[in-house]
Amino acid sequence: MTIKDIARLAEVSVSTVSRSLNDSPRISPETKERVKRLAAELDFEFDASARSLSTRRSGTVAFVVPAFLGCFSNTLYLNLLIYDIRAGLAARGYDCIVTEAATPDGQSAIRRLILQRKVDGLILLLEANRPEDWSLLKKRGLPVVHVHYMPSYIDTESLDYYFTDNLAGGRLAGEALLRSGSRRIACLIDQARNPEMEDREKGCREAMLALDHSLDPLVHLEAANTFEAAYKTIRGGARLLSGVDGFFVATDVMALGVLRALADEGRRVPEDVRVVGYDDVEIGTYVKPSLTSVHQPREEIARLACDRLVGLLQGNAREGVEQCLLAPWLVRRESC
């Protein structure tokens, strides 16, 4: 079965079949539906290598992620986001290569993908990257969308990006603790202190100031983004944490370490102290008490990023750049 056979059966031209199967906006929905139905009934699929030669397109998108995803703690949320984006691209007819920014020998994976023409566009989940990679992307004109991290290496005014409003998320956490009765609050963030972590802490501080300027200042804590590091920070900080009756913990995996440490200290949650995490990953529902957490709208981030990139690839995207800060929300459970 060839594309010519599909065209003959559908009583349309070969180019119409090609455009229909590639979701071209130039073809009416009725014609696209008829062509796709015939193709499905006849088990027709494009020859990827032939299509690449004729269109200079691979039908593949690269999703570039940081190397630290090899650490379990960092994958709890980001793996969910990666899954949502891969599924979103597949639903739109694109294959997805997930790769770290650098190859095992230290070379740029982005440069290799571009020069070998393996991908048509990229989604970047990177806070830092090589400036020369960005220059090559701009020179070759490949569509690029950023998610999750605000990149620090380029002029963000020219970027398409979709991020969680971490400042608003921090406010939600602070407000939840204050409304539950906490008056001396500690905030534990990842010691990497990237902008998303600082925004979460800043939002919590703003919530406290908005409620009552006479409250004790927010107690700032830092640790590695792991269960063990968070646990040790709480167990080893008895003097600093004296009187603290609320914890905002900037990732769920650290929040679980805080819950364990408080239990080992003999402090009841939520009776003596309240705890709010951030990310809303499923593991927070497995513990007792279950973890109240700020939900990042990863499903919407994935949908918008995939829509934008595919629109850019197919030439029907809205002009200009799209820059979206998406609102998180609080998921209340037992810890606050």
Image (cartoon, rainbow, N blue to C red):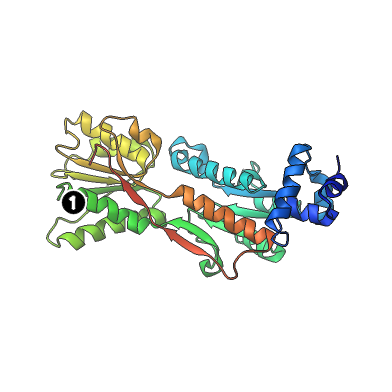
Identify the residue position indicated by label 1 in the image: 178
Q: Is residue 328 left or right of residue 84?
A: left
Give residue 280's quadrant in the image: top left
Residue 27 locus on image (x, y percent): 73, 59
Q: Is residue 247 left or right of residue 65?
A: left
Residue 305 locus on image (x, y percent): 55, 55
Residue 21 locus on image (x, y percent): 74, 50
Q: Is residue 243 left or right of residue 237?
A: left
127 to 246, vertically: above or below: below
Instruction: State the SS at label 1.
Output: helix
- Which image quarter holds the C terminus? top left
57 to 271, vertically: above or below: below
Residue 311 locus on image (x, y percent): 63, 59
Q: Residue at x 49, y 57 (%)?
A: 162
Which kind of residue does numbered mark 1 sit on? Leu
For the residue pair 262 and 8, the one nearer the viewer reads as 8
Q: Residue at x 14, y 43 (%)?
A: 242
Give residue 334's quadrant in the image: top left
- Which image quarter holds the N terminus? top right
For the residue pair 248 and 161, the one nearer the viewer reads as 161
